Amino acid sequence: MREIERIKESVAQKKISPVYLWYGEDRFLIQEALRVLKSFYFMMDPSGSGIETVSAKELSPASIVERANTMSFFANRLVVVEEVTYFQDGQTADLEPFLDYFSNPNLLTCLLFRAESVHKGRKFYKALDRAGEILEFCAPKRPQEWLAWTQSELKARGKSMDTQVATLFIEWAGHHAGVLSQELDKLVIFIGDRQKITTEDIKAITIRTLEASIFDLLDAVAGRSTAKALQTLQDVLRVEHPLKVLALLVRQVRLLLGCNALRRRGGNGAEAPSALGISPYEAQKVWQQSSRLSNEQLSRALFECLNTDLALKTGGGDPGLLLEMMIIKFLK
């Protein structure tokens, strides 16, 4: 989020760093930042002739430096180096041309490196850090961060949501910035000139994730609501394969058992993300849900899941009916 704002500010002030390193887990945010950065060069040359994308796996450092030093008819150039592997163990590429270039970069060229991960102790990283700017693109982690991101995206689109509505939207659409952005675009078109997006709009147009439905299903089980549990299951099975639904149920039950085990050891919800290997947002929801389901219930549910998995894979009956029977057994 903040990284894109920094790029927007640089473009607005026409102060582009001669060297960038962008890395991180969120490819969508990186693509959005790249779109913003490219807009600076398209303003000077709508044809985009000053923009070049190369692969670090296909070109040597010396060849990339040569391109960075090449002058453009329109003076300013952007050279994007994809698939950067210079931080990996065993990297044999001769990086000296880059180290020389960083000491005196071409100020009319922006040389942008894109990598999935970096090693901050490497000589290449330190030299690049001195010469330019390094940005890490990470998706929001905690609920408040996702809410802030959503509200920022809404503001950019000239729309708004109440906090409760935004929370529902995130739960329905999931925790992937690219997916959320696409769903927001759909909502903007759907409501037209209206400024505020409502719960009804989200339910009418937003695609609900399978994970959100699984949470609702287990909530119904915890609340002993057979009708709601079976209705939720039917809704899910209309759009997802039974084996996928079962796999997510098994995963969820195991996470709930993990939370209960952590609770018995005197742990708390703050420890759940690292202990279970899940995001803080998901951990918070799982931790709350686990308090409503006993270990006995969850152990029995896992046993029934495994029996149903065996029946599904051996042709033991209609998949939908087998899952319904499993849910009914959960509720006993």
Image: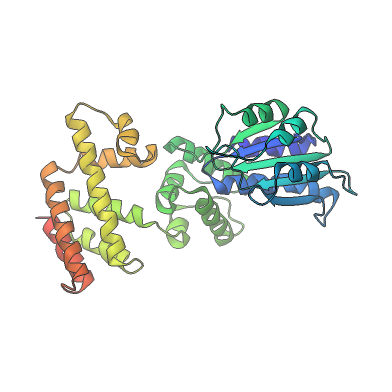
Q: Position of residue 127 (x, y in %)?
A: 68, 27
Q: Is residue 233 above or below residue 257?
A: below
Q: How many marks?
A: 0
Q: Quadrant of the N terminus?
A: top right
User: Which one is nearer the viewer's eye here, 146 or 224?
Assistant: 146
> Which residue is found at the position 27% from the left and 50% from the top?
251
Q: Position of residue 101 (x, y in %)?
A: 77, 33
Q: Position of residue 88 (x, y in %)?
A: 54, 39
User: Which one is nearer the viewer's eye here, 60 or 295?
Assistant: 60
Q: Residue furthest right?
A: 73
Q: Is residue 52 above or below residue 134?
A: below
Q: Position of residue 133 (x, y in %)?
A: 68, 31
Q: Quadrant of the C terminus?
A: bottom left
Q: Is residue 188 above or below residue 26?
A: below
Left or right: 67 as drawn, with respect to 149: right
Left or right: 180 as drawn, with respect to 38: left
> Which residue is found at the position 20% from the left and 31% from the top?
263
> Which residue is found at the position 72% from the left and 44% from the top?
37
Residue 158 appears in the picture as rendered: no
User: Which one is nearer the viewer's eye here, 171 or 8?
Assistant: 8
Residue 275 appears in the picture as rendered: yes
Left or right: 218 as drawn, with respect to 52: left
Structure colour scheme: rainbow
The quarter holding residue 106 reads: top right
